[in-house]
Image (cartoon, grey):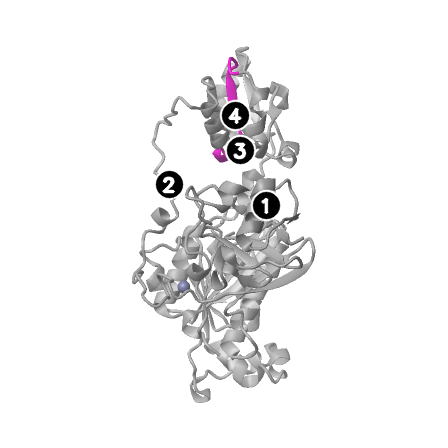
């Protein structure tokens, strides 16, 4: 029987299994067999018209079915079918003649001696690294190992883009920052650490979010772009700006135990990110690392792979990951590789491109940009603030609190002392019957996003007395109970 490998992000809709035995002789038939066994998967794989969603890629063995016969692609008993959803991180340095490359100082020769004695790098390769410039988008999980190793390797100029501030919850994986840096802008913390590692590297810092308004101006100054972002808007923006400017874009992304890496470079004959994922998933469908978690080591592995690819591009050695998607599974400790093809219909790098300038990426990804907070916090009638809920509980009001997070999050901290009950969001639709629509119900999660979905399920089921805890248990920790652990 053929087998379908289920990616981590979708396993919760497939009984938490990693692979499902299916029946059928074509890709379409085995997918139908899969969704018959696990109906919850259907809406994640197909749109309302029954068409395979464009951000879901299906591979038979290592080939994308879009490059074969789509859903009519034959599947043999021994074939492996994989679903690869989008997961919400000598070319670059233009061929320079040896005489135009910068010389190395005596200090630099001593520092890079282990490179200089390798024939594949040597004096010329090290001078190419010194002549090169790389833009790192993000100084977080992927940006940390990228920055550390690229600075150590002697890249002449590194650009760092980030707008965030170091938080305690970053330190489990963002190893360029230290405990003493909590509260500092990441860009400053990273700059201090990288200049300590290698004072010969010029560091350009951009304390801003990369946006359509500034991306071309920033990216045009660099040979190579490295995408270390954690959201789809910036990923598409980095891809589009890199393609429009003809720069290679070294891609990496991470989720829980799974990682992906590739080099998108239509100028080098390969596809771009849009060839692989023409459209982003709708907001909320694919969990972010903040919601789903990430193994702290994983960005280390994927970031170091990205750094390796950047160095290979600069020195012009080896086979780059152009046209190949590398998949890493830390639990199995396995790498797999899929062939990526350039999509001739790609709106950006295809034969008749329609995207010729940067667009509104928030709108493209269906995101509403954050609005400035109103001075007096207005709470709509479907929400309750933590302080208000606490006051109602203290006054003796009977309230059923439903926690829709996962059991391992419940273990970190919960509202059990107020009678809170755990019903994870994935089980919510089938367990609605455990609730009484006459009760006053408050749903909550970590930050308020998942519980808003639970609110929708209850509303649809005819419940009237429901409210969502604004800001989730993190807001409860901030506003009501300082002893509640934050994560
Ligand atoms: Zn493309």
Q: Secondary structure at mark 4?
A: strand
For the residues labelled 2 and 1, the Cα–Cα distance comes to 38 Å
Q: Determine which quarter of the picture holds residue 300.
A: bottom right
Q: Determine which quarter of the picture holds residue 380.
A: top left
Give the number of the mark in front: 1 or 3: 1
Mark 2 and mark 1 residues within 8 Å of each other at the beta carbon: no
Q: Is mark 1 within 8 Å of ligand 1?
A: no
Furthest residue in direction bottom, as rendered: 99
**Picture disc at residue 370:** 2
Tell whether position 15 is magenta: no
**What residue is disc 1 on?**
34
Q: What residue span does the magenta drawing correspond to?
A: 437-450
**What residue is disc 4 on?**
443
State the residue in front, 176 or 393: 393
Among numbered discs 1 and 3, the one appearing first in the sequence: 1
Q: Residues within 10 Å of mark 4 (few under 14, many from 20)?
A: many
Q: Is residue 253 above or below residue 124?
A: above
State the residue in front, 245 or 18: 18
- Give coordinates of residue 47: x percent, y percent: 44, 44
């Amino acid at each position: 029987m053929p087998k379908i490998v289920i990616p981590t992000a979708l396993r919760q809709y497939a009984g938490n299994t990693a692979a499902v035995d299916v029946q059928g002789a074509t890709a379409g038939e085995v997918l139908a067999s899969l969704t018959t066994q696990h109906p919850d998967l259907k809406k994640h794989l197909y749109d309302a018209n029954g068409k395979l969603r464009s951000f879901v890629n299906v591979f038979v063995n290592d080939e994308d079915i879009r490059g074969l016969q789509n859903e009519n692609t034959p599947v043999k008993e021994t074939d492996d079918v994989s679903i690869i959803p989008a997961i919400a991180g000598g070319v670059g340095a233009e061929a320079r003649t040896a005489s135009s490359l910068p010389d190395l100082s005596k200090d630099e020769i001593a520092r890079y001696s282990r490179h200089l004695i390798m024939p594949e790098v040597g004096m010329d390769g090290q001078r190419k690294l010194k002549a090169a410039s790389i833009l790192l988008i993000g100084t977080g999980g992927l940006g940390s190992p990228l920055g550390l190793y690229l600075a150590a390797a002697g890249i002449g100029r590194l650009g760092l883009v980030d707008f965030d501030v170091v938080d305690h919850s970053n330190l489990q994986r963002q190893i360029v920052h230290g405990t003493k840096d909590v509260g500092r802008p990441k860009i400053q913390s990273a700059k201090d650490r990288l200049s300590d590692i290698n004072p010969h590297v010029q560091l350009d810092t951009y304390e801003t979010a990369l946006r359509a308004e500034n991306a071309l101006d920033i990216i045009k100054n660099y040979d190579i772009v490295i995408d270390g972002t954690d959201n789809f808007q910036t990923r598409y923006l980095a891809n589009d700006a890199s393609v429009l400017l003809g720069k290679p874009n070294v891609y990496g992304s991470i989720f829980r135990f799974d990682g992906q890496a590739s080099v998108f470079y239509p100028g080098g004959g390969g596809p771009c990110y849009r060839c692989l994922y023409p459209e982003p998933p709708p907001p909320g469908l694919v969990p972010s690392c903040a919601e789903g978690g990430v193994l702290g080591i994983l960005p280390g592995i994927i970031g170091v792979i990205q750094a390796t690819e950047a160095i290979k591009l600069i020195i012009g050695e080896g086979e780059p990951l152009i046209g190949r998607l590398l998949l890493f599974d830390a639990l199995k400790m396995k790498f797999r590789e899929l062939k990526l093809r350039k999509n001739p219909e790609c709106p950006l790098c295809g034969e008749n491109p329609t995207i010729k300038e940067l667009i509104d990426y928030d709108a493209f990804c269906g995101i509403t940009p954050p609005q400035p907070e109103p001075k007096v916090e207005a709470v709509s009638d479907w929400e309750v603030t933590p302080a208000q809920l606490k006051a109602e509980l203290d006054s003796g009001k009977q309230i059923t609190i439903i926690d829709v997070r996962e059991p391992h999050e419940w273990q970190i901290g919960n509202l059990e002392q107020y009678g809170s009950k755990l019903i994870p969001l994935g089980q919510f639709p089938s367990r609605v019957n455990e609730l009484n629509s006459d009760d006053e119900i408050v749903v909550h999660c970590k930050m308020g996003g998942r519980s808003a979905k639970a609110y929708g399920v209850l509303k649809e089921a005819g419940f009237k007395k429901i409210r969502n805890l604004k800001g989730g248990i993190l807001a409860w920790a901030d506003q009501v109970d300082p002893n509640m652990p934050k994560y």
